[in-house]
Image: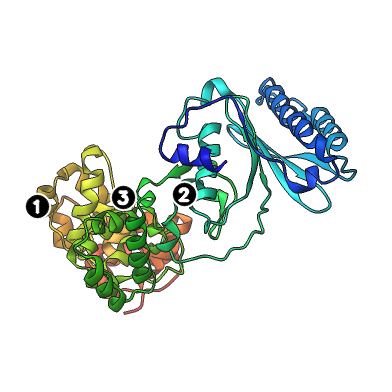
Amino acid sequence: MKSVARNIKNRTYPVRDEFIGSLPKDFIEKMQKEDIAENTRKIQNLFYNFSKQMQSFDIERKKNIAPEVVKLSQKLKEITQISDLSVKEYGSGKIGRTFLIETTKHKYMLKMFFHPDIIYHDPSRNHDLELKNMLLTHKYDQARRAPKLFAGKFGRDGFILMKFIDDNASKKTTGLFASGIRLIGTSDDHYDNVRGDTLLDFGMSDRREEFFNVKVTKIARLIADALDKDSPGLAKKVLTAHGQDKEFETAFAAVLEYGKVNRLLYSYDETVQKFPIKALRAFGAKASSLMLEKLTEKSLNWYDLEFMEKYYNPLEIIESWYKKFGKKLNQADSNEEVAWAFSRGITVEKLEKIGFARENIKLSVERNLYEIIHSGVSVARLKDLGFTQKDLMNAIEYSGQSGKLKLKTRVLMQTGKQKLLKLIGDKRLSRLQSLIGKTVEN
């Protein structure tokens, strides 16, 4: 398999209809030495024919495959002479099935794809890609905790036989940034295939070209270590040793691209990981800017934005976010990010200069008005944007009536009676107190 992996790395390996690898030790230990080669071919063909048979099953109708699984188990027992061997269906996803093969000593996973005519030519998820990524991992990324590949077959009716790693696999993790330095990785969108740093399955895995360069990988590990430890001292050492190397920028960008940057945000985990602000500042303004670009590559909620405000000014944040999403906005869109920027003192004129349409700004503020009021925005700014006193009262009442927002309104009321009197007037304040069931303190 090593030569195949080398050819795959160099992109010289064509897709061939052939078997690779060898069987697990306990599959062959009861066989006579002279029978191993023939019995290996029998098992390869057994899996291959079973894979072809699975292609004929209509997944939507959930046809019962249990009898076929029993037959597979019986034939595998006969060839391996393992009396306690069993096979059972383990799981089924959108494009493939898995089967658990269990003996007294070990557990294995047999994986195959269905609907080949639909998915085979999709380069992001076909069988050949998974098999190639497994081979690359085992030859070039041996530190990666992943299931061992025993055997497989390229082609539409191929299969993968690998060691089984259950959901209780070690949750030991490296840092958020170091964990991304892998030749083969998995995005957060398919993170159910990962436990800690252990990759359970190669479904939707991606090849990270940058880390096939040894120098880039070396520098990336040093950068990641400095960020994970938030150490300005380590950051300065990296800059001194490699800051002028042509691979440095590629390495830094790759660390942020594949590191679990989203986990720094409040919306991912309320415990929030330590933000590496000291190390970023030591790396310089460009590094800090690259981090901001990465953080704003997704939709952000109010809590994310408040968290980011600790390290970046609001104008920087909204400008960076606009670069990613601004051209996709329609005038009728409302965005929490725009409302938050308004609440942080960024004027309508500045928001328009960035590129936001006035209609978009007003609608964004309107749909987040309870948050805007709580943040302390003056009534004059809201009236300049076209809101009336009645609009403010309606927004507060709406937040009180809608279950989850009721708590936010209670928080708003804690801002004081005098402020609310200015906003909504005495009669409406009485209605609000009645609605919430609480008296506003002075």
Furthest-right residue in this view: 83
Which residue carries the number 3 mark? Answer: 297
Mark 3 burial class by Cα count in 10 Å: few <14, some 14-19, many 20+ = some
Residue at image coords 45%, 31%: 123
Mark 1 burial class by Cα count in 10 Å: few <14, some 14-19, many 20+ = few
Furthest-front residue in this view: 34
From this view, report whether residue 234 is shown above or below residue 258.
Answer: below
Residue at image coords 21%, 65%: 243
**Direction from residue 342 to residue 30 in the image, left or right:** right
Mark closer to the chain start, 3 or 1: 3
Tell me where residue 309 sits by quadrant.
bottom left
Q: Can residue 378 be seen in the rendering of this structure?
A: no
Which residue type carries mark 3? Glu
Label 2: state its secondary structure.
Answer: strand
Distance of label 2 from label 3 (alpha carbons): 19 Å
CB under 8 Å between discs 1 and 2: no
Provide residue 430's location: percent of width, then percent of height. Answer: 36, 66
Distance of label 1 from label 2 (alpha carbons): 43 Å
Which residue carries the number 2 mark? Answer: 185
Provide residue 70's location: percent of width, then percent of height. Answer: 84, 32
Tell me where residue 171 sits by quadrant.
bottom right
Which residue type carries mark 1? Glu
Mark closer to the chain start, 1 or 2: 2
CB under 8 Å between discs 3 and 1: no
Distance of label 3 from label 1 (alpha carbons): 24 Å
Which residue type carries mark 2? Gly
Tell me where residue 130 sits by quadrant.
top right
Residue at image coords 74%, 25%: 63
**Direction from residue 50 to residue 272 in the image, left or right:** left
Which residue carries the number 1 mark? Answer: 349
Provide residue 245's location: percent of width, then percent of height. Answer: 22, 60
